[in-house]
Amino acid sequence: MAPERIYHMNESIKLILIVRNPVIRTISDFTQVHYTKQAKNKTQIPFASVAFSKSGLLLENYKPVRNSLYSKHLLRWLKYFPLDQILIVDGDHFISEPLAELRRVERFLHLEHEIHSSQMYFNRTKGFFCFRHADGKPPKCLGETKGRSHVEIGEAAENNLRRQFAPYNEKFFSLIGHRFDW
Ligand SMILES: Nc1ncnc2c1ncn2[C@@H]1O[C@H](COP(=O)(O)OS(=O)(=O)O)[C@@H](OP(=O)(O)O)[C@H]1O
């Protein structure tokens, strides 16, 4: 639905897709669900019971899982847009070297380099890079719901996720002509 609508709005639009290791993305999403439930005093459900069937199969419709099946989503966009209109940003690399990924975004959009290395600094308390405005305004980190410690889902669940994401990852790599170390 969305790709078709956007295509009709502007078929030469440039799209940016940010991805990270889908296992970590799923746990990150589940962590978000966990804290939202906690804030509402709702019962927490263990990861394995919502993400896997009784026999251990990945439940592809569980949102944190579904949104991490990149090949499925990308295929829908590729029906309307060629790959060279889509920039794939490496979200894991963005965490450790944000400026390098931001430069790629600037190049893709044919923008001048507006962000300088002096504006990105590592905030030890946050454990992530934060941003200094050029005009001397106070520096800005992302909010406290970004970059929290993840809920422990256990090694077996992580391995199960890794194994069942693998074919989707392979499909994604072949669609984009590039591999990630997931
Ligand atoms: N500089 C900086 N500061 C804080 N967080 C950073 C930063 N760069 C990347 N990230 C990662 O961004 C993740 C949150 O982005 P999301 O796309 O999940 O946000 S959103 O909830 O969809 O709005 C968030 O995921 P979690 O660590 O799981 O919270 C971060 O790992």
Image (cartoon, rainbow, N blue to C red):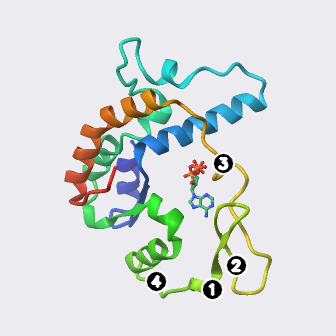
The local secondary structure at tag 3 comes to: loop
Q: Residue furthest front?
A: 155
Callout 1 touching callout 4 (CB < 8 Å): no
**Distance from the alpha carbon under mark 1 to that under mark 4:** 19 Å
Which residue is the site of mark 2? 132
**Distance from the alpha carbon under mark 3 to that under mark 1:** 25 Å
**Residue under the image location 31 percent in, 40 percent down:** 72
Number of the front mark, 1 or 4: 1
Which residue is the site of mark 3? 148
Task: Using a 10 Å C-alpha cutoff, classify the residue at mark 2 as few (fewer than 14 neighbours), some (14 to 19) or many (20 or more).
Answer: some
Number of the front mark, 4 or 3: 3
**Distance from the alpha carbon under mark 2 to that under mark 4:** 19 Å
The local secondary structure at tag 1 comes to: helix
Q: Mark 3 or mark 2, which is nearer the start of the sequence?
A: 2
Residue 47: where, in percent of width, then height? 53, 25
Q: Amino acid at mark 2?
A: Arg
**Distance from the alpha carbon under mark 2 to that under mark 3:** 21 Å
What label does residue 111 carry, if any?
A: 4
What label does residue 118 carry, if any?
A: 1
**Residue under the image location 70 percent in, 60 percent down:** 126
Residue 182: where, in percent of width, then height? 34, 49
| In the depicted structure, whether residue 53 falls above or below residue 144 | above
